[in-house]
Image (cartoon, rainbow, N blue to C red):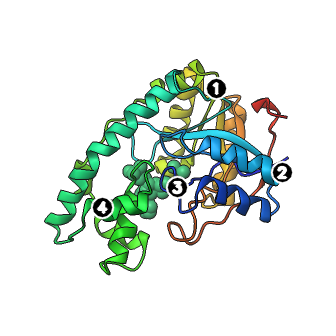
Amino acid sequence: MRADLHTHSSASDGQHSPGQLVHLAAAQGIPVLALTDHDTLDGIPEALTAGSDCGIRVLPGVELSAKEYRNFHILAYGFQVHSENALSQLCGWMKQGRDERKFRILDFLREKGLELSLEEVEEFAGGGVIGRPHFARALIRRGYADSVQEVFDRWLDTPEYARIKRPKPDARTCIETIRASGGKAVLAHPYQLRMDSSALTDLTAQLAGYGLEGLECYYPKHSPEQTAFYLELARRYDLHPTGGSDFHGKAVKPDVCLTAYEQDLQWLEIL
Ligand code: AMP
Ligand code: ZN
Ligand code: FE
Ligand code: FE
């Protein structure tokens, strides 16, 4: 079945509201869409309603950042959406961490001579969790840069930026929390870990031991060789291959479109 299992809305750092995102997917003929905002479940109810309105299948999801490595992200699907459960509580804790980080990012940018008010950043965040792309879009509007990528390259993904930390769970906690809430954990975009094949193999084995059930093999930036290697890793550790675009909208990631990848969805127990 064709599905895009990795997308972001304005509940985190995507451009479009959850409802708009689902309508975009429907207009593009995508039959199954998972909403996987960073560290929040807040967009899910609106996305589910929009899915019923326009007749596509919407799956609740989330993308958690684990602390061990840069861009070490774990996707979750199939969990119970409950304000009381362990996954919601973990998201609440991570949201607090982002709320506290925003002041440190503003100070960091000010040190670089970039003046930005909290209100400007919050305007782009629209009440959702605050992510670095919101700072990037506010800086672009101020005329400091021409693209989100330029902002990351010059300021927000530099060795100096790396000192600005936010609280994150370790990968084992992410996976165990997802499972405790009835969900299934999938390692996102393995290429972003920039590990050689032996290190990635060791990490995959370790995560499988914690209860990881899937590996995001299909992803716009994976080369055919990378996809083949990830499929082999998935086979070796009995993980389900998944695929998703990581769509954030043109204003955030201009080169990424919604994409339905052919994949098995039965293991997610949604059909
Ligand atoms: P945050 O979770 O708020 O620290 O920001 C993570 C977001 O920033 C993710 O959506 C990434 O897509 C984006 N991001 C991280 N690093 C880069 C980069 N080097 N270039 C462009 N976007 C990035
Ligand atoms: Zn993002
Ligand atoms: Fe990610
Ligand atoms: Fe993502």
Earlier sequence position, callout 2 versus callout 3: 3
Disc 2 residue type (three-letter): Gly
Q: Which mark is residue 1?
A: none
Disc 3 residue type (three-letter): Ser
Q: Which mark is residue 80?
A: 1
Mark 4 or mark 3, which is nearer to you?
Answer: 4
Check disc 1: other Cα within 10 Å, few if <14, some if 14-19, many if 20+: some
Task: Residue at 37% x, 75% y: name it.
Answer: 140
Residue labelled with disc 3? 10
Do the residues bearing badges 1 and 2 touch, measured as CB atoms within 8 Å? no
Earlier sequence position, callout 1 versus callout 2: 2
Check disc 2: other Cα within 10 Å, few if <14, some if 14-19, many if 20+: some
Earlier sequence position, callout 4 versus callout 2: 2
Instruction: Provide residue 229's location: percent of width, then percent of height.
Output: 66, 47
Gap between marks 1 and 2 measured at Cα:
22 Å
Mark 4 or mark 1, which is nearer to you?
Answer: 4
Q: Which mark is residue 119?
A: 4
Res 180 → quadrant: top right
